[in-house]
Amino acid sequence: MFKEFKAFIMRGNVVDLAVAVVIGAAFGAVVTALVADIITPIISIPGKTNFAQLSFHIRDSEFKYGDFLNALVSFLSVAAAVFFFIVKPLNMLAERRKRGEAAEDDTPAPSDEALILAEIRDLLKAQRAS
C-alpha cells in the first residue's frame, strides 16, 4: 500500500497540481495587493477607497450597498488585472510563436504534377532495378 501511495504522490499531475496551487496562492497575494493598493485608489470616489459604510434607508430597512460595491470593484479590478497583465501578454506571446512556426513551415506543398512525376520516377527506378 505504501508503494501505491508513493506512486500516486510522485505522479506528474499531482506534483504539477501542488506547484500550481502554491504558485497560484502566491500570485493571488500579488494581484490582491495590486488591486487594493494601486487600482482601487485610482478608480475610487474621491476620498473613499472603502465603500462599506454606504447605505440607504427605505422606511425601517437599511440597504448596505457599500459591501456589494466593494466586492464588485474588487472582482472587476482583479479580473482586469489578470486579463491585461497575464492573459493578454501570454496570448500575444503564443500568437508570435505560432506565426514564427508558420513562417518556418511555409514551404509550398508539391503540385499534383510533381507528385505524379515523382511516382513515375520511382516506378522507372524499380523497373530498372529488377
Image (tube, helix red, strand yellow):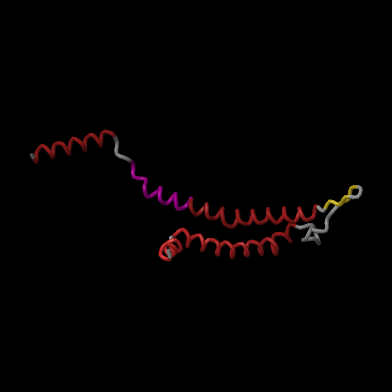
Q: Does residue 87 appear left or right of residue 38 in this picture?
A: left
Residue 121 position within the rendered picture, expressed as x and y whole percent measured from the top left = 17, 38
Q: Residue at x 48, y 60 (%)?
A: 14
Location of the C terminus by quadrant is top left
Q: Nearer the viewer, residue 14 or 46?
A: 14
Q: Nearer the viewer, residue 109 or 30?
A: 30
- Find out whether residue 100 is within the magenta segment: yes
Q: Residue at x 47, y 52 (%)?
A: 96
Residue 57 position within the rendered picture, expressed as x and y whole percent measured from the top left = 88, 50
- Find out whether residue 44 is within the magenta segment: no
Q: Does residue 116 appear left or right of residue 70 in this picture?
A: left
Residue 90 position within the rendered picture, expressed as x and y whole percent measured from the top left = 52, 55
Looking at the rendering, the stretch of residues picked out in magenta corresponds to 95-108
Q: Residue at x 69, y 63 (%)?
A: 38
Q: Residue at x 42, y 62 (%)?
A: 4
Location of the N terminus by quadrant is bottom left
Q: Main secondary structure of the magenta part?
A: helix
Residue 105 position within the rendered picture, expressed as x and y whole percent measured from the top left = 36, 47
Q: Does residue 105 appear left or right of residue 39 in this picture?
A: left
Q: Residue furthest front?
A: 1
Q: Residue furthest left?
A: 130
Residue 42 to residue 122: above or below: below
Question: Which quarter of the figure has residue 24?
Answer: bottom right
Number of numbered labels in the structure image: 0
Q: Nearer the viewer, residue 50 or 89?
A: 50
